[in-house]
Amino acid sequence: MTGTPRLIFSARAVERLRAVLDDEGGDVRLRVTVFGDETEPQFGFSLEREVGPEDTVVEFGQIDVVLDAQSAAALDGSEIDYLDDDQGERFIVRAQQPQGLW
């Protein structure tokens, strides 16, 4: 993939992430990682203070997101949302169908 990935954050996700990042304080970024395979991709979220030389940092609103190359390609066109319902609180990814990434 070349260029900046198209990644959408819902207003709920931005609000919740902003609260989490503010609680952490300092220079903290959100890392989103895609692993698994094309048929059942898994998505991981973590907080990062350090950025590796192979990473890309993209600003989405007030959120700095750290992505490795494979995750950036897999997440291109996806939406990240935050849900708080009878199943609990969680972030979800509505991903485009990854093609040929693994």
Image (spheres, rainbow, N blue to C red):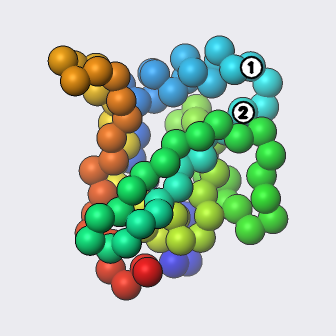
Instruction: Name the quadrant containing residue 91.
Output: top left
Q: Which residue in the protein does label 1 denote?
A: 25
Tell me if mark 1 has few (under 14), some (14-19) or many (20+) residues whose alpha carbon lies within 10 angstroms of its own.
few
Against 32, residue 49 (above or below) is above
What amino acid is at disc 2?
A: Val
Q: Which residue in the protein does label 2 denote?
A: 28
Choose between 53 and 3: the one closer to the eye: 53
Rendered location of residue 42, percent (x, y) = 39, 56
Q: Is residue 57 left or right of residue 72?
A: right
Q: Which mark is residue 39?
A: none
The reply to whether residue 6 is in sight is: no
Rendered location of residue 36, percent (x, y) = 41, 66
Q: Is residue 25 left or right of residue 78?
A: right
The reply to whether residue 57 is in sight is: yes
Q: CA distance from mark 2 to mark 1?
A: 7 Å
What amino acid is at disc 1?
A: Gly
Rendered location of residue 13, percent (x, y) = 40, 30
Q: In the displayed image of the protein, which residue is found farthest to the bottom?
A: 100
Against 96, residue 102 (above or below) is below
Q: Quadrant of the C terminus?
A: bottom left
Q: Secondary structure at mark 2?
A: loop
Q: How many marks?
A: 2
At 55% from the left and 17% from the top, the residue drawn is 19
Q: Is residue 94 left or right of residue 15?
A: left
Rendered location of residue 76, percent (x, y) = 41, 64
Instruction: Name the quadrant containing residue 48.
Output: top right
